[in-house]
Amino acid sequence: MSKDPASFIVAGIDGSAAADAAAHWAADEAHLRNAGLHLLFAYQIPVVGHPEYEYPPEFADAIRAAGQATLDRVAAEIADTYPDLDVKKTKKEADARLALVDESKNASMTVVGTRGKSRLAEVLLGSVALHLAAHSHSPVAVVPHSTPQFTQGPILVGADGSPNSDAALGFAFDEAVLRGAELVVTLAWHELTYHRLARRPVIHGTAAEEAEAVLDHQLAAWCEKYPEVSIRKVIHRGSPTEGLLRHKDQSTDDPRLVVVGSRGRGGLSGLFLGSTSHAVIIHSRCPVIVVRPGQ
């Protein structure tokens, strides 16, 4: 019996080590969720057979063959680990950004890789991952490939007291239950103090107790819904980005996963994604999941 399309996790692959790492992480997640895995190889072929271009028609065939070989290889590797996992393979001639956004309509999560740490990280990442995080119809996981696998640490999620971060909190609580992990919820109160026009509670003064009250209020319903989840609250004096990326400086355990929200306004890649989620997916050493309101 075939699975409902919405029970599949989509992973974009392109033959790179970064994409391979993302696909294997997606397979782990699919196994954990009892979901299927949809491997997508999207490609574009330059115009062939035109006198102003030097590409021979065989060039297009070679690209298609390489894409199929990549799909077969990654699927075989995943089958070695999860022989019972339902794996679907799709080769699609389209811009990878548009293809992934389209496939995300029928996915429970969409996963892509990044090339990891680099001075050009934002440029290298932006063409696919940032576009997808800003436009996807499902939560988006961005998985670094050049870092150790984090399997024992807590799940870290950012909150800001607003309804916009509830989607990220709900996803993070679900992940904590699935993984049997501690959930660390962080709120940056210094940033809230000075954002007078922000669509979130404005904390007056500099008392950390006021920030904690905002966090307690937002978490009350979630704690009641998920009484089995162990929660640790962190009030960070500084920007939300610093609070999420520098959590390792405050704890002996690196997070296994970071969950962030997004303004989700669409527009140009990254521009309207939100400065916090934008920066975290670029610089985080562990997988980051961006959850937009309504997902």
Image (cartoon, rainbow, N blue to C red):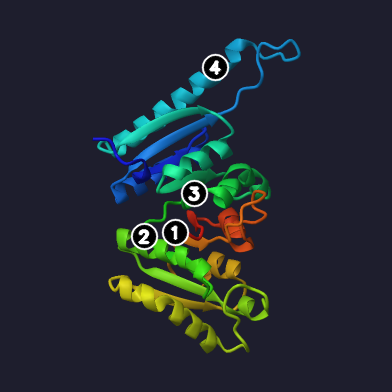
Q: CA distance from mark 4 to mark 3?
A: 32 Å
For the residue pair 275 and 21, the one nearer the viewer reads as 275
Q: Secondary structure at mark 1?
A: strand
Kindly identify the residue that appears in the image at 74 percent across and 10 percent down: 51
Quadrant position of residue 78: top left
User: Percent position (x, y) of residue 189?
Assistant: 58, 79
Q: Are marks 3 and 1 in contact (CB under 8 Å)?
A: no
Q: Secondary structure at mark 2?
A: helix
Q: Circle 4 is placed at which residue position?
A: 62
**Residue 100 visible here:** yes
Check disc 3 and give the amino acid type: His
**Neighbour tally class for label 2: few under 14, some 14-19, many 20 plus, Cα within 10 Å:** many
Q: Circle 1 is placed at which residue position?
A: 257
Badge number at residue 175:
2
Q: Circle 3 is placed at which residue position?
A: 137
Sequence-wise first label, 1 or 2? 2
Classify residue 220 as left or right of residue 159: left
Of circles 4 and 3, which is in front?
3
